[in-house]
Image (spheres, rainbow, N blue to C red):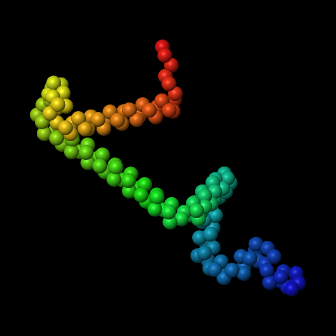
């Protein structure tokens, strides 16, 4: 095959390429492309279109890398997160409803008596203390020991 046969069938310029595509002969298509170019011009001129293309490329890379195991892990993580938020929301709503039923807030001594009388109060307090301790541990690991005064 010679170069002459390739150049006679392939368009030599953008104008020839546009003339050779039947869909571009439709006036509605040409009007739509003109509108698209008008809207895309600021993105092209400001170099922001590059960011969009980079984002599409990164998304494409993630889709190509995602295998069944990764999708399953992400689904499990999502389900765990949603169920944790639901449980916390449900607990706070229930506790608020219980507190709203009482006419006056309990005294400090009555609240402290619940520590001896109610096993669930002690368990909840233990959970809260464990959360606070974990915050402290992570804070120490992130920021190091606090300097002495």
Residue at (88%, 84%) from the top-left corner?
A: 2
Residue extending farthest top: 149
Q: Quadrant of residue 124?
A: top left
Residue at (61%, 77%) from the top-left corner?
A: 27
Q: How many marks?
A: 0
Give the answer, above or below, for where 6 lies relative to 34.
below
Residue at (25%, 45%) from the top-left corner?
A: 91
The reply to whether residue 52 is visible in this rendering is: no
The residue closer to the viewer here, 134 or 62, is: 134
Give the answer, above or below, for where 82 lies relative to 116.
below
* Residue 61 relative to residue 80: left or right: right
Instruction: State the image coordinates of residue 121 (x, y, percent, origin top left).
Output: 21, 36
Residue at (13%, 39%) from the top-left corner?
A: 101
Instruction: State the image coordinates of residue 44 (x, y, percent, origin top left).
Output: 67, 57
The reply to whether residue 97 is visible in this rendering is: yes
Instruction: State the image coordinates of residue 138 (x, y, percent, origin top left).
Output: 46, 34
* Residue 2 relative to residue 123: left or right: right
Q: Quadrant of residue 110?
A: top left
State which quarter of the image contains the N terminus.
Answer: bottom right
Give the answer, above or below, for where 25 lies relative to 66.
below
């Amino acid at each position: 095959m010679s170069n002459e046969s390739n150049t006679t069938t392939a368009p030599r310029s953008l104008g020839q390429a546009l003339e050779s595509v039947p869909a571009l002969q439709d006036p509605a298509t040409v009007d739509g492309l003109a509108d698209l170019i008008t809207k895309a011009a600021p993105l092209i001129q400001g170099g922001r279109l590059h960011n969009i293309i980079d984002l599409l490329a990164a998304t494409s890379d993630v889709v190509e890398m995602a295998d069944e195991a990764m999708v399953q892990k992400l689904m499990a993580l999502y389900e765990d997160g949603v169920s944790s938020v639901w449980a916390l929301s449900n607990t706070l709503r229930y506790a608020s409803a219980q507190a709203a039923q009482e006419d006056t807030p309990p005294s400090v001594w009555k609240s402290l008596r619940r520590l001896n009388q109610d096993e669930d109060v002690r368990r909840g307090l233990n959970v809260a203390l464990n959360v606070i301790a974990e915050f402290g541990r992570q804070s120490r690991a992130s920021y190091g020991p606090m300097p002495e005064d």
